[in-house]
Image (cartoon, rainbow, N blue to C red):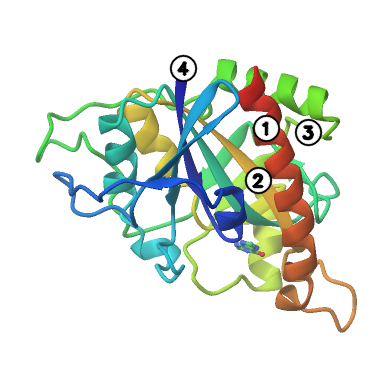
């Protein structure tokens, strides 16, 4: 049976069935992960779910221990990791309530622990990070989306901001000028750490709002999040079902 890791962001607790088994949290050389792993059988997979922001969710994006999270999944012997990330939409490619499978990212974060291999605990290594997401895993997700009847655009650039505050309209204009289609706070350093750890990693972005400066007059980011989040997570649940059935 395939063992896959699922790192769930905002709103993704709904993906975990009631019957999931809680594994005792184990510490790592990098400290403690965000919370206990939960495991369940889905189709042909054993899914190991880790809530990125803890449970109840409360760990800010810049304070997530990404190294411990990726390490603990590696220790569990997962063959691939899927990140589920709520994002804001910048360009028309990123339609609220839908999913995207980004193929690129730009990292605007700072002050996070970005590496296992920085010459302190493990020897210095400069891993190749382009493309940043695993091609074979992305193809499997595209096939699953086709079976589930879900639209899953595969060309999109994810701009990773520091948070936890949301952006200004000018910051979003700058991201757009840089080529970003969507904005979120958690893809990095998670994706790069997965690469260093030798784990196949892809990220499914759930568009839960229009980004700052892209809202209709009088609109607010929080005002539109709940409805779009629910819609997007129901697509993620169907995507996961189809992915695990294969
Ligand atoms: N900006 C940054 N991160 C986010 C957003 C946003 O608009 N929506 C969800 N995560």
Whichever of callouts 1 and 4 sits on the residue coming sooner in the sequence is: 4
Rounded to the nearest angstrom, the CA distance separating label 4 from label 3 is 28 Å
- Marks 2 and 4: which is nearer the front? 4
Which of the two discs, 2 and 1, labels the residue nearer the N terminus?
2
Q: Residue drawn at (82%, 34%), measured in percent from left and top?
A: 150
The answer to whether the residues at label 3 and label 1 have Cβ atoms under 8 Å apart is no
Does label 2 or label 3 sit earlier along the sequence?
A: 3
- Between discs 3 and 1, the one toward the N terminus: 3
In the depicted structure, whether residue 170 falls above or below residue 174: below
Residue placed under numbered mark 1 in the picture:
241
Reading the chain from its start, which is encountered first: label 4 or label 3?
A: 4
* Tag 3 secondary structure: loop
Residue contact between numbered discs 2 and 3, judged by CB atoms under 8 Å:
no
> Pointer 2: what residue?
205
How crowded pointer 3 is (Cα within 10 Å; few <14, some 14-19, many 20+) is rated as some
The crowding category of the residue bearing disc 4, from other C-alpha atoms within 10 Å (few below 14, some 14 to 19, many at least 20), is few
Quarter of the rendered image showing ligand 1: bottom right
């Amino acid at each position: 049976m395939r063992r896959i890791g699922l790192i769930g962001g905002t709103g993704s607790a709904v993906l975990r069935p009631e019957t999931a088994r809680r594994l005792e949290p184990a510490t790592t050389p990098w400290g403690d992960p965000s919370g206990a792993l939960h495991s369940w059988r889905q189709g042909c997979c054993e899914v190991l779910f880790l809530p990125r922001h803890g449970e109840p969710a409360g760990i800010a994006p810049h304070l997530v221990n990404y190294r411990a999270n990726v390490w603990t999944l590696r220790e569990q012997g997962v063959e691939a990791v899927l990140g589920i990330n709520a994002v804001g939409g910048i360009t028309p490619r990123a339609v609220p309530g839908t999913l995207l499978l980004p193929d690129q990212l730009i990292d605007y974060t700072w002050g996070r622990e970005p590496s296992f291999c920085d010459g302190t605990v493990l020897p210095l290594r400069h891993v190749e990070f382009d493309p940043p997401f695993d091609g074979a895993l992305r193809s499997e997700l595209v096939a699953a989306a086709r079976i589930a009847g879900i639209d899953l655009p595969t060309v999109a650039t994810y701009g990773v901001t520091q948070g936890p505050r949301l952006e200004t309209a000018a910051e979003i204009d700058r991201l757009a000028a840089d080529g970003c289609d969507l904005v979120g706070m958690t893809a990095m350093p998670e994706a790069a750490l997965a690469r260093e750890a030798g784990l196949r990693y892809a990220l499914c972005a759930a568009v839960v709002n229009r980004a700052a400066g892209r809202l209709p007059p009088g609109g607010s980011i929080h005002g539109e999040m709940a409805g779009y989040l629910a819609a997007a997570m129901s697509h993620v649940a169907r995507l996961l079902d189809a992915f695990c059935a294969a």
